[in-house]
Image (cartoon, rainbow, N blue to C red):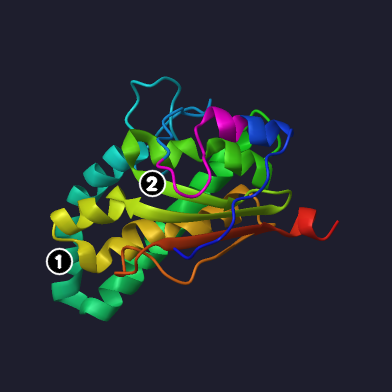
Amino acid sequence: MIGFRSAAPSNTSSKAALRKSKLTPRGTRPNLTRPARLAHASPMSDRTDKGDGELGILARRKIEAAIIAPIYDEMRRALGEEKARDILSRAIRRAAIDAGAEMAARAEGEADLEGFKAILPLWTKDDALTIEVIDDGPGVFDFNVTRCRYAETYRAMGLGDIGDILSCNRDGAFCEGYDPRITLTRTQTLMRGASHCDFRYRSRAQTSS
C-alpha cells in the first residue's frame, strides 16, 4: 500500500496478542498462523474450530469456490451476469454477517475492535495474507496487505472475475455481525489489480470516547 509509519508499541492486552501472532511493522513479512479459540466451523462461514489441524479459512474458501463456480455459471446463463452477481453478492454478504455474529457470540472476551485484532490470525493462517501494520492504537487498526493468496487462488481457479464477491466483500459485512461499531474503509485491493489492499478499521465506540 503507501509508505506509512508503524504505530508505537503498547502494553495493552490486545497488543500482546498481536505480538504473539507475529504482527510486525512495515518492511517485514509476518506469518500469522495461531488460531483463536473459537468453535464449530461450517461451510460459507469464517468460523473455525480449535487446534492447528482444522482447515484454515483459505482452504475452506477454495472448497467453497469449487462448489459455487458451477452454480454461478448456471445462474449467469439463466439470469444474465448482472443478476447472477447480485444474487451471489447478497448470499455471501448474509453469510459473512452471520459468521461475524456467531464469532462474536463465541468470543472469550469482548467482541470489539481489540477482540477483532486478536482473531486476525484466523484469516492469515497458511500464509494466506502478508500484511504490514500501520497503526493499531485504541479504536484504530490500519494495515496493508501486500500479498493475498485468496486472490491468487481464485485467479488460479478461473474465478478472478468474482473473487471480490467471494472474498473481499465479506470483510465489511463480517464487521456488521461481529460488532456494528467497527467500520472498514478500503480504497483498493490486490484482487482488483492494485499493488496492495489498504485496510483501515475504526471503532466508533473507542474513537468517540
Q: Depth check: 69 or 8 in front?
A: 8
Residue 130: numbered disc = 2
The magenta stretch spans residue 21: yes
Decide: few, some or many residues near mark 1? Use Cα within 10 Å; few <14, some 14-19, many ≥20: few
Residue 74: numbered disc = 1
Q: Earlier in the sequence, mark 2 or mark 1?
A: 1
> Percent x, y for residue 172?
52, 60
Residue 30: numbered disc = none
For the residues marked 2 and 1, what is the alpha-carbon distance in whole angstroms? 34 Å
Q: Is residue 61 above or below residue 53?
A: below
- Stretch in magenta: 17-29
Question: Is the Cβ of the residue at disc 2 closer than 8 Å to that at disc 1?
Answer: no
> Percent x, y for residue 37?
53, 25
> Percent x, y for residue 14?
67, 35
Give the image quarter of residue 156: bottom left
Which secondary structure lies at badge 1?
A: helix
Q: Depth check: 93 or 193 in front?
A: 193
Q: Is residue 37 left or right of residue 70?
A: right
Give the image quarter of residue 91: bottom left
The answer to whether any part of residue 136 appears in the image is yes
Which secondary structure lies at badge 2?
A: strand
Which quarter of the image is occupied by the N terminus? bottom left
Residue under the image location 36 percent in, 40 percent down: 57
Q: Depth check: 188 or 93 in front?
A: 188
Residue under the image location 51 percent in, 39 percent down: 23
At label 1, which amino acid type do we have?
Glu
